[in-house]
Amino acid sequence: MTTEQSDAAGGRAGSPSRPTAGDTPPDVTPDVGGGTDTATPPGGDGGADTDGAGADKAGTNGRAGTGGRAGTGGRASRDDRAGTDNSGTDSGMTDSRAEASKAEIASAGTDRKARTDSKAKTVDQAEAGDEAEAGRSGTGDKAKAADAAKRGEKDGEDAGDPWTAFGPAPEPVLTRPRRAVRAVGRFLVHEWTLAAVGSLALAVLMTWPTLRYPRYTLPQDYWDPSLQSWQVAWSGHILLTDPAQLWSSNTFFPEPWSFAFSDTLLGYAPAGMIGAGPEDALLRYNILFVLAHALATFGAYVLARQLGAGRIGGAVAGASYAYAPWLLAQAGHLHILSNGGIPLALAMLARGHGWSLRHGYRPRRRHAGWAFAGWLVAAWQLSLGFGIGLPFAYLLAGVALVSAVVWFVRRRRVKRPFGRRLFLADLLGGLVFAAVGAALAVPYFKVAELHPNAARTLGDIQLYSPPASGFFTAPAESRIWGELHEGARAALPWHPEMTLLPGFVLYALAAGGLFFSVWRVRHRLFLLAGVLVTMALAMGTRFLGGRFTYVPLFEHLPGWNGLRTPGRMMLWATLLLGLLAAGAVTAFCARVRELAAERVPPWPGPWLRLATLVPLLLVVVEGLNVTPHPVVPRQPAVMRTVDGPMLVLPSSQNLDQPVMLWSTDRFQRMVNGGSGFTPESQAQAREFTVSFPDFASVDYLRRRGVKNVVVLRDRLGGTPWEGMLDRPVDGLGVTREEIGDAVVYRL
């Protein structure tokens, strides 16, 4: 079709209205009149001649001169000048809109029905198809200039188009180093990265001065922490040297399975592979002590976020879980403070199953990898000890049972409510968790079989069961409430395990969460029920005699009779209270954002947003501590030279725990050892050696296989062994040697 024919067709199809300044430019108006050529894909044959002619006539503008595909043909067909000569149009319009109008006039040559059918075509599609056809037509240098203008090239003339400034900039091609830098930058500003760093920084501050002298001091005291420092060191050492002897430690000689006399912290064994000796053991313990608080904060934060809480609400849940005042009394028990794997594993399992407390079950968000990782974290948490790991294991077993029932009920109503990959991930992960639990339980069953006195009785449970007043009493290590609650602590039979205050701020926030929260009402009631049930369990035999709470678990659930301190169930109540508080704080933050947006002028907005940090600040302040950090007694030089099997005197539960720490240089076999119970053989050794050195004690030790007895001179005062250094050794076949402040008797 020639230009004149195209103009004539445009005159027949058009209306007498003239395009005005209010018309949409060709580059942003949908193509409604491009003719049958607009239906041809980019690069097609149809309409190449017509579009090429349009490109010659439309001027130097590459985009505007590409015929019906670039312009708004419907508008051009209604121009009262559509039937005039193109030269007249050129003289009448000198700017880019005139050139666009010429393109519109040239594009109006097809029937009205085809124009109507092409209304759904976008401008970008039209331009792409027109350029491809113009390149194929070969109808002149101006078509080539249009093609070059689109690609930012020059073909002997300036083809600049003012409309190209509104086009998207081309994506830069990143080199591999720049991609790596961008990936690292995104990782550093990710929410989980910031949460982890914030949790670590908060842990360093809240546990200070733990890291001030980490090679010489221990938090709380140097008895149980010395034992646990030895546990981490022994597990790392023996797994590198002789893994088959893991459970037969160098302490409590010659008792087998001695590593299972208390919680083992076996999950920290990789850390125990680094360094050697008491100073490295102390450094390792103090670092793990800080990291345990950081992981608890991070785990509870992640769980709250997965369930649907906001960032500040999640931070409140994390801080209240890690720094609850009652946990300050457990500062000497790393196996209790190492609880961050519990909420972290629950968060991973919830994420893997696409479940959220706020949004319910969302199958599209399922991810088998997260579910399997959650089982692995749960298995690692169990390896840190059964003190808090056993209730966690029973909880997961209950959740798995409920999930199986739900899947069975919904399998016919919902198509694939569970998913094959997720099922396999749960199956394999659950088997790994069960295998780890069974492998760790075997040594403890052996210990219970060999040492009946290791079993707990209901009398032991009653001794450590706290009254209801314990839930409102803080330990002495609390900076805020410690002195104020001194009288209340004096009324408790054993206050280190009975001061169970999770925080008055946490109580208030959780109570508010019952009435004002982002959680549904039924979820709030479930959380409240969980809090009440776990508190009743924490009271042991003090709540209705324990007949309907703790006693049935103690008598019927395997392993439950090994837990002597029911007050540690407060860990679960604290976590549930934190989730209730997170729901309230999240709702409060949402309301604050609404108020900030409604205020005029908006300048008070930032101050309102800062108000949302007040609950978090109050929770952190209530968790401040005055935990002592005593200096650990230095290792005697004799411990670095004397071989085992050996006995260090004087000996008792507390005195033996630093001795275990001192053995981390060489791990000599020794009769000494401290744990949750005293084996009969060790009690006999202490009884027989009160009169050492004499014939009976020397004969007993030789029959036990002991070769050396080390007496620490500066520790004899006030013990049954006081004055033993004045006794002669004549006729006993024993040699005596002084090494520093110690005396060594070689049998």
Image (cartoon, rainbow, N blue to C red):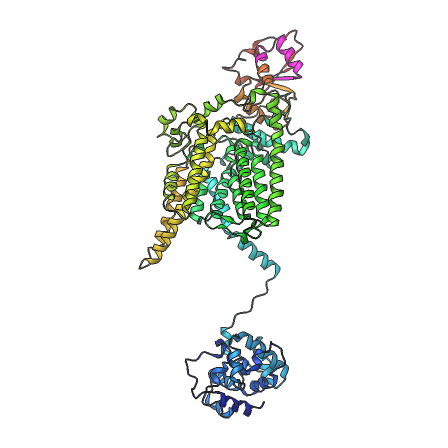
- The quarter of the displayed image where residue 642 is located: top right
Q: Between 516 and 167, which is closer to the camera in this rendering?
A: 516
x, y (%) of residue 608? 35, 52
Q: Is residue 734 above or below residue 101?
A: above
x, y (%) of residue 65? 54, 83
**Is 709 inside the magenta-drawn segment?**
yes
- The quarter of the displayed image where residue 438 is located: top right
Can residue 63 be seen at all in this image of the molecule? Answer: yes
| Residues shaded magenta | 687-712
Q: In screen coordinates, is 13 left or right of 268?
A: left
- At horizontal 49% and vertical 80% (from top left) the residue drawn is 72
Image quadrant in which the C terminus is located: top right
Can residue 90 be seen at all in this image of the molecule? Answer: no
x, y (%) of residue 272? 60, 34
Q: Between 699 and 138, which is closer to the camera in this rendering?
A: 138
The single residue placed furthest to the front in the displayed view is 412
Q: In screen coordinates, is 406 left or right of 695?
A: left
Q: Is residue 10 above or below residue 189?
A: below
Image quadrant in which the N terminus is located: bottom right
x, y (%) of residue 476? 40, 29
Q: In screen coordinates, is 276 left or right of 592?
A: right
- At horizontal 62% and vertical 78% (from top left) the residue drawn is 44
**Is 473 inside the magenta-drawn segment?**
no
